[in-house]
Structures are given as C-alpha cells and as structure tokens.
Image: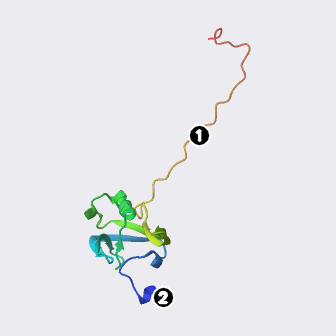
Amino acid sequence: MKRNDLFPSKWLKGVTMAGDTNLTITALLQEELGDDRQEKPVLYFKEVEQGLVLNLTNFNTIADLYGDETDAWVGKKITVFPTEVTFSGKTSLGIRIRARVPGVRPAQKTAPVVLPPEPEFPADPEFSEETNF
C-alpha cells in the first residue's frame, strides 16, 4: 500500500495527481488551517472530495479567468496540474491551475502574410520620367 492510501489527505496534493485534471468548482470556503489556525481560502469540487487550499498564484489565475468575485466561480471549470514548486526553500510537487478555460481552445494565431519584395528592374537609359509621361 502507498502512503496516501494509508493516510488519505483532506487536501488535493501534487504527489497524488497523475496529470491535468478538469474540475468543476462547487464552493470556496474560508477555513482555519495549520497549527496557527490561520484562515485560508479552500476550493471544493464536484468531481473529488478533497479541497484545494488556494495560494495567491492559483487565486490570481482563476480570477484572471472568471473575475475577482469568487461567488461567480461556482459551476465554473478549471484545469489543475502537478508541477514542481519551491516553498520555504524546498522543491516539491505542488498544484497549479492552467490559465485557460477547459474545453475551450485558445484562438489560433495565424502567421502574418509576408509579401516578397518587389523586383528591382534596371534603369532604362531611354526612359526618363522628365521626358516620358
């Protein structure tokens, strides 16, 4: 058995994720966490039981997608993914949120049209703009 099977967590963790996961937000609650019982925002989802403790980076990503009013986030989808993060000088697997709405493809960027340079013709010694109109 794995550690996470023996000691399941109440929180989503990067080490338990296999890759990108689309989740539907059901609630954002303020909860007292840690030994100092500080209040932190926690997201809950339709697809999983664990909550995601929001840091400022993830909060800002969701706010950029759906606005600052957190009540409007309910019912919205996000994509979470595990990635290496540094916390208190240590690198570990954390969770980040993709800066795009799941299921919506970003607009395709088209390459600018580049026209070939106009050909240069040698000057015609018999033609003069002053004499030939």
Q: Tell me where residue 79 appears, x and y as whole percent.
A: 41, 67
Q: Which of pointers 2 and 1 indicates the residue nearer the eye? A: 2
What amino acid is found at the position of numbered circle 1 in the picture? Val
User: In terms of secondary structure, where does tag 1 sit?
Assistant: loop
Give the quarter of the image for residue 14. bottom left
Nearest the eye: 109 or 3: 3
Which residue occupies 43% across, 70% down? 95
User: In terms of secondary structure, where does tag 2 sit?
Assistant: loop
Q: Badge 1 local density, few (<14 within 10 Å), some, or many (20+)?
A: few
Give the quarter of the image for residue 29. bottom left
- Residue holding disc 2: 2
**Chosen colour scheme:** rainbow
Give the CA distance from mark 2 to mark 1: 57 Å
Q: Tell me where residue 102 appears, x and y as whole percent.
A: 41, 64
Nearest the eye: 101 or 12: 12
Q: Tell me where residue 10 appears, x and y as whole percent.
A: 35, 81
Give the quarter of the image for residue 8. bottom left
Nearest the eye: 31 or 58: 31
Which mark identifies residue 7? none
Nearest the eye: 93 or 25: 93
Rendered view: 108 above or below 28: above
What amino acid is found at the position of numbered circle 2 in the picture? Lys
Which residue occupies 45% across, 79% down? 16
Which residue occupies 74% across, 14% down? 125
- Residue holding disc 1: 114
